[in-house]
Image (cartoon, grey):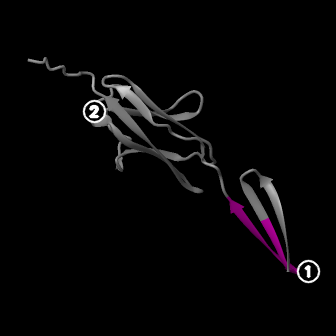
Amino acid sequence: MSSQLTSLFATHWIIFATHDENSSTEIIFKFNKFLLLRLSDQEANEGKQVVLKCKINCTPPPNIAWFKGGNDITKDPRVKSYKDPNGFDCLNINSASRGMAGEYEIKATNDMGTAACKCTIKVNSMYSFIFPFC
């Protein structure tokens, strides 16, 4: 039995395995690099806007879901999920609060599988209390 490895595209490989002169088997392996640019940790002052960005490139286009602390927040009214004109999948927090601080995750899923990336948002308190010395 002999085999031959052929690249079709950057994300597809075909292996032809020949059993004898009358039969062969074609096996197609598909893989794809999902995450081109990962999320990065963010720090913001309370009340300020925070935008998380991740560059995802795969075919077929994936379904995107955003999570905070393991809970799906894609439909949370405090955030907006969208794809910007440069092709980044974004999560916009219009007004950061201390309750919005924590670990965030994006998950991209299609027929090829799932890719995920996490980051942390730190929110600084807007007020600092100064106690006078007596």
In the image, what residue type sits under mark 2? Answer: Arg
Residue 122 position within the rendered picture, expressed as x and y whole percent measured from the top left: 36, 34
Residue 116 appears anywhere in the view: yes
How many callouts does the rendering have? 2
Residue type, label 1: Glu
> Is residue 18 shown in magenta?
yes
Front-lying residue, 106 or 44? 44
Which residue is rendered at x = 35% and y = 22% of the image?
A: 48
Question: Quick check: 121 left or right of 8?
Answer: left
- Locate residue 42: give its quadrant: top left
Q: Point out residue 62 in the picture as x, y percentages from the top left corner.
A: 55, 47
The residue positioned 60% from the left and 48% from the top of the image is 34
* Image location (x, y in percent) of residue 35: 59, 45
Instruction: Name the image quarter holding the C terminus.
Output: top left
48, above or below 25, in the image: above
As drawn, the residue found furthest toward the right would be 21
Above or below for 88 versus 128: below
Quarter of the image where the N terminus is located: bottom right
Which residue in the structure is indicated by mark 2?
98
Residue 113, image x, y percentages: 56, 57
The secondary structure type at the circle numbered 2 is: helix
Taking the image as shown, residue 33 lies to the left or right of residue 66, namely right
| Magenta stretch prevailing secondary structure | strand
Mark 1 lies on residue = 21
Q: Is residue 98 above or below residue 26?
A: above
Q: How far apart are marks 2 and 1 (CA)?
A: 69 Å
Magenta-tinted stretch: 15-30
